Amino acid sequence: QPSFIRQDIMALQAHFQAKRDWAVQELQALGMRIRTPRATFYLWADISGLPEPLNDGVTFFENCLEERVIVVPGIFFDLSPRGLRANHKFSPCAKYVRLSFGPEWDEVRKGVAAIRRVIDHANADGGARM
């Protein structure tokens, strides 16, 4: 493989690693538990330690929408065959959200700032907006 291809690969890896490491550090500082991914630009955030009701993935998602940032509730990834879980609260994924650090740096920073506002609002007012 030509050396310029290897250089591009290394530059891309360094770019995404820097965004990943920054996002993980910032989100952990907000009270989320995150296992650092090795091969993707998505983060799974355990939000069970956030103040109620933000510690529910759907509620967290709804509150983030108010700040114009999208996270994906973990229950969207719960494969419940034949609808066996009628209530998402019983899903093992209910206290998780998935986030991406794939967008441009500026968008990742704006997203984390929006998430910080959601959590700060809940901490100041004793709960989520919804």
Image (cartoon, helix red, strand yellow):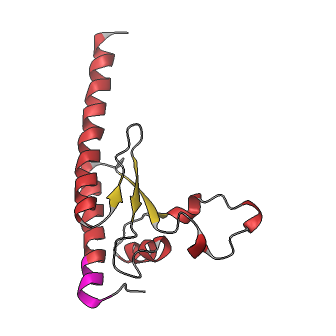
Quadrant location of the C terminus in the rendered image: bottom left
Q: Position of residue 11 (x, y in %)?
A: 25, 29
Compare residues 65 and 17 and report the one nearer the observer. Answer: 17
Q: Is residue 91 left or right of residue 59?
A: right
Q: Position of residue 47 (x, y in %)?
A: 39, 67
Residue 114 among magenta residues: no
Residue at horizontal 33%, vertical 9%?
A: 2
Q: Position of residue 21 (x, y in %)?
A: 25, 46
Q: Is residue 59 left or right of residue 4?
A: right
> Most extreme residue toward the bottom, as rendered?
125
Compared to 2, does 55 lie above or below? below
Residue at horizontal 68%, vertical 70%?
A: 85
Q: Residues in magenta?
A: 120-126
Q: Position of residue 46 (x, y in %)?
A: 40, 62
Residue at horizontal 52%, vertical 68%?
A: 94
Residue 29, picture quadrant? bottom left
Residue at horizontal 31%, vertical 17%?
A: 6
Compared to 125, does 103 lie above or below? above
Q: Is residue 78 left or right of residue 7?
A: right
Q: Of helix, strand and loop, which mostly describes the magenta segment?
A: helix
Quadrant location of the N terminus in the rendered image: top left
